[in-house]
Image (cartoon, coloured by chain):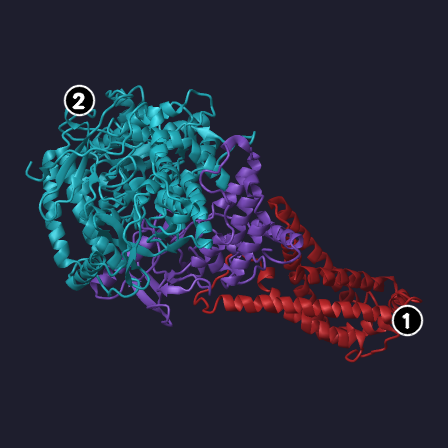
Chain colours: A cyan, B purple, C red
Amino acid sequence: MDLYTEGDPIADAKAPDGPIETRWERRRFEAKLVNPANRRKLTVIVVGTGLAGGSAAATLAEQGYQVKSYCYQDSPRRAHSIAAQGGINAAKNYRNDGDSVHRLFYDTVKGGDFRSRESNVHRLAEVSVNIIDQCVAQGVPFAREYGGLLDTRSFGGAQVQRTFYARGQTGQQLLLGAYQALERQIGLGNVEMNARHEMLELVIVDGRARGIVVRDLVTGEITTEMADAVVLASGGYGNVFYLSTNAKGCNVTASWRAHRKGAYFANPCYTQIHPTCIPVSGDHQSKLTLMSESLRNDGRVWVPKAKGDNRAPRDIPEDERDYYLERIYPSFGNLVPRDIASRAAKNVCDEGRGVGPGGLGVYLDFADAINRLGRKAIEAKYGNLFEMYERITGEDPYQVPMRIYPAVHYTMGGLWVDYDLQSTIPGLFVIGEANFSDHGANRLGASALMQGLADGYFVLPNTLANYLASGPFDKVDASHPAAVEARATVEDRLQRLLAINGDRTVDSFHRELGQIMWEHCGMERSEAGLRKAIDEIRTLRDEFWQRVRVPGDGEGLNQSLEKAGRVADFFELAELMCIDALHREESCGGHFRAEHQTPDGEAQRDDERFAYVAAWEYGGTGQPVLHKEDLKFEYVHPTQRSYK
Amino acid sequence: MNLTLRIWRQKGPEDKGRMVTYKVDDVSPDMSFLEMLDVLNERLILQGEEPVAFDHDCREGICGMCGLMINGNAHGPQRGTTACQLHMRQFSDGDTIDIEPWRARAFPVIKDLVVNRNAFDKIIAAGGYITAPTGSAPEAHATPVAKADADAAFESAACIGCGACVAACPNGSGMLFTAAKVTQLSLLPQGQPERYTRVIGMVDAHDEAGFGGCTNAGECTAVCPKGIPLNTIGRLNRDYLAATAKRGGTPGS
Amino acid sequence: MAVTGILLVLFLIAHMLGNLKIFTGAEAFNHYAHWLRDLGTPLLAPGWYLWIQRTVLLVAVLAHIGAATVLALRARAARPVQYAHRKKVQGSYAARTMRWGGVIILLFVIYHILDLTTGTLNPVGDATRPHSNVVADFAPERWYVTLFYTLAVVSLGFHLRHGTFSALRSLGQQTPAGERRARTFALVFAVVLTAGYLVVPFAVLTGLVR
């Protein structure tokens, strides 16, 4: 293709072989250790304080390393892991319902549409049980049964009840557990916490990641921080779409800067789109709010049969309504998986049958459920969600059907890492949503929290030691030419952004970029659309660098400057996402190509040609270079999903 | 709708600061309060003025980053709602809205409406945790927890650390925040070994940070977007009294 | 605050019960007053008990005011810049007026001692005839005394309502049900005490006691 070149295949050199149940055990045993007395002499930088970063920083400090932790928020407790609602999976089999490590492994590989690594996923399933123990010991108030034992529920269509939860605030509670462990280490002087700091560049010395350049968001001061290893836990890049369920500050800058310095970016086109979000209410919209998936258990999804029917929903008679999920998927009905429900909603809206402002919404109607079960029962089950809906929309969902629409929610792609979670840059480790490793093309519900904590508490602290044991590395400080150069790059870039002084705001560019991405690289992608998107992104990016206006200066708090830097990186990522989506001529998980569907409109995978991880090397101003990592399935054999 | 905003503008920590009046037109009732500020900021930028700095992140009421004093109410007029979840339909055309930062010595203003809440982190670092280094945990089901205790612990654990309690308190006290964490951890069996050192450490850190003392006025719980109950402070007091009695009145010894 | 407050509250209860003896007639009332002076005899010399009680009360009052001052100073230090727009959300009237209410009560107590203890400001001012002192005090033509007294006692009622609840909280009351009970108890207690103190002057004013 004209947009990229293909390089050598890449392989996961750290992946152990042998029976899958023994791989992680063996890898840990074979890993080199660092003498406790020497750990104090080693410094590790951790960027991000979510479930992955917070738990990693706390654990590394407990082990005796000197940790420097960074987050852009005003406190490590605010990382966006906090917003996760549903729960966390673990193969505890407390229900005696047939769950096991192997079943969680199997479900995750299958749910990822056979685009993840078996070894990684098995390890994830293994450590899932330790996570629950760890969190309970920290005082995480999980839901409990009357007998005092932990309650679990089934989530996201799983057939076993393996999801542990703390009402609708599981992410918050798990994050606060990790945050408190982190604060304890900060109090003990083992972690130097730098809140309101943003990583703007990676420092590489002699081929190893040895530091970062950060900007203090309060004073504007730029400093270079050196260390023996760097860990990125900076989250996903869903905000490339402008509107998503991510927090406003979520960004790809840390990952993207590392990518530009040589770390490969894997599978950027895999994005998860959640079907039940509150629709956009106007041009002012700044973010989208997720409504728990559980609503589809009792709500019925419909749109009017006729195009442009703008009667009030209650005035539309039953026989003029199209309960399209029940019609197309009679056996699963309203409970089809996320990607299918999302795409179906898009299709009916594309036909002009969407409801609400702008025609981008479908009804989620509880009238039948209220008639059948009574208002009381519905209130008990969904009361808080109904309240939240009313607060945001001003409509009472007991009287009027809810309006929902899909929204970008999670990104499965991320920096490429090996089994040890190390990127293609030695000494640069990537954990949590920022890496690509465990979810393949689609993430199962309640697995994001599991992966973040698995990486941070249990995987990284073992594998990082192996890397550090290969030291000691030469002592370097901020005066090293590589560090000075990295710092100069950052300063230049900030000055460039401030100097443009054009006539458009950062947000206006971000919004426009988001529209392009949503239109052409969202729920359904096509060759023509993606090519168009790439052209539009390039044009808009040029315009950005000529017309953006960033008020103020680099001294002190300047929120426009922060945003400008992030959006500039989103522009580059957006192009790579489209190229990745264009090159992957198949449909799988969170990537649906219009050209590749079964006759009845379902995703059609092409295992012959695409059973690989697409790891992209930064191509400078030229073209990105594709490196393929072949995926082998020894334990779970690829099958086609069907929900008819 | 058209609104008049009077917003606290302060260039930096050293600046004295003042209320500045702005007009905002064509505000949609479906906007969130922060989106209304976004609209104002877009205009200010294009006019060559500095946009209003304010903290926000998740915009779904859980991260605790946003916090504005809106017409004298922490997080605005709607109960149980953070500023980011407050919508403009709560206001009427022609309203004048005063917007100020949280005001407390322990929360110094950084710029405009942005304050530094690091004092809360220090309170947690002084004991708001259970010491359980990674890997040391026993099997999760080894210690059952009565459902009532687990539920009550959750209720306190729901605190988002936004600081509204301090902002609203006539004494500028951070006791509700401190008590919420003390309560959560002292209700759970896992939290017992550190129960008394925790409460003393946290209260000392609270006082050191420059927060005022609690007089049980109840403003905090009224504005708390998560409805943390006032009786958590009673539990803190009880633990604190027991702790000082047990340790002969010498904190932390 | 809580401990000194409770000491003062115990005194208030005893003082109110004593006041109510006025309804049993002048003789009984005077007798009660004289008994107070002689309380503890022969172990103590006459009047000594009262001086012990006065000392304890004085210390309690000073400590109470001291603690309140510390709280007020801390509160002021905790918010160096005031809000331009301040509106109270919930906090009961009682909770908000603790400090100024306390000041009113203090001024009243000073007047009250000069009036009915030393007799300096009393039209009769005869220490041997407390009943006459009281009746003279609240005579209809001295309506302003009754008004001031009423104002002070109502302030005291508010002070007690929040003070009682707050003291229970400070001493560790911690359950939601307990909170409801504590609030109810504080309200009832404050109303009873307020009423108990107000009956006397109004009884004099209306001529019920003469």
Whether residue A12 is situated above or below residue A80 in the rendered picture: above
User: Dot 1 corresponds to which residue?
Assistant: C45
Where in the figure is residue A2, as x and y percent of width and height?
A: 5, 38
Kindly identify which chain the residue marked by label 2 belongs to.
Answer: A
Q: Quadrant of residue A55?
A: top left
Kindly identify which chain the residue marked by label 1 belongs to. C
Residue A356 position, x and y percent, is: 27, 39
Report which residue position mark 2 lands on.
Answer: A598
Numbered label tally: 2
Q: Name the foreground residue: B132 vs A370.
A: B132
Residue C19 coordinates in the image, percent (x, y): 81, 64
- Report the front residue among A566 and A600: A566
Left or right placement of residue A329 versus residue C202 in this view: left
Amino acid type of the residue tagged 2 in the rendering: Thr
Q: Secondary structure at mark 1?
A: loop
Locate the N terminus of chain A by quadrant: top left
Image quadrant where residue B6 sits:
bottom left
Residue A394 in sight: no
Instruction: Work out how far the residue at label 2 is from the one at label 1, CA to CA, in angstroms.
Output: 108 Å
